[in-house]
Image (tube, rainbow, N blue to C red):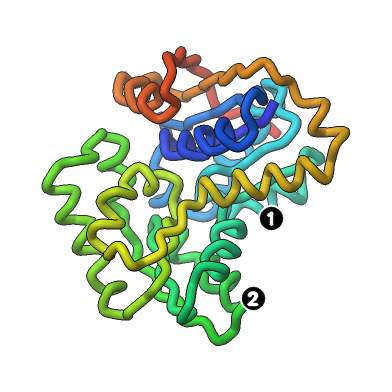
Amino acid sequence: MIGIFDSGLGGLTVVRAIMDRLPGYDIVYFGDTARMPYGSKSPRTVVDYARQDSMLLIRKGARLVLMACNTASSVAFEPIARRLETPVFEVVTPAVETALQCSRNQRIGVIGTRATIGSAVYERKIKNRQPDAAVYSVACPLLVPLVEEGWLRKPETKTIVKKYLTPLKNRQIDTLVLGCTHYPILKHIVQHKIGKQINVIDSSLAVAEKLAAYLTDQPSLLHALPQTGRVRLLVSDITPQFESMAQMLLQQKVELEQVRLPVDL
């Protein structure tokens, strides 16, 4: 199975993208709803959580692990990838590569959680590939709770998104990276507020393409992955909001399984 984890329901945007790009492959997803959000936690805590989440997925049958969480990808990818024998993927690098391909003036904006923005991972990766690029980052700590609450069309949400994006509009960016997998759920608001002429990069789509390319180059792994079309959803706390949002995002009836953490690694 393809294992995917996030702090909450945002990683389901990655599940949806992989279902579309690799239809039929089995997926096991873990949403750490009892401990979300990760974006306000210390790096050490995020690494601990990411380690536990990864081992949970492996014990449930995952043959590879995808960190569908920008916060975990920013601070935990390297220590987890070093420790696991299972292939591990993150969502930052694919989004960076797509942003650089799309940007015309190399003025790129990034929005994310406090932990992701504080790590400066996007700026480092963009500058490593394009030293002349200008990167402007804004932490948006209120957006994940708004998504988790299902406030997708509330006027308050639109006001907050506009407030966060105004500094980036003033910087005359031409490309905006959604540096959190929760944010594509608000893409309709973000695109409207930032302007239709701005490229908005959805990391869920970018990482789905990256995973598909990797599996094409690893035919033995590709053929070893089950293809029954099963999507198994694990959570650390069952909430009605998660269930309804999961059904909306995946466009199918879902059944949630509650699991206990921590899992020792």
Residue at 42%, 35% (x, y): give it: 8
Q: Secondary structure at mark 1?
A: helix
Residue 78, disc: 1
- Give the mark nearest the N terminus, 2 or 1: 1
**Residue 249: x percent and y percent?**
40, 30
Q: Identity of the amino acid at label 2?
A: Arg
Comparing labels 2 and 1, the label whose residue is closer to the camera: 2
**Residue 14: x percent and y percent?**
52, 39
Q: Which residue is mark 2?
A: 129
Q: Secondary structure at mark 2?
A: helix
**Residue 224: x percent and y percent?**
82, 26
Q: Identity of the amino acid at label 1?
A: Glu
Would you say the residues marked 2 and 1 are in contact, meaning their CB atoms lie under 8 Å apart?
A: no
Q: Is residue 163 left or right of residue 134?
A: left
Residue at 60%, 25% (x, y): give it: 28
- In this rendering, does residue 161 appear at all? yes
Query: Is 236 above or below relative to 255?
Result: below
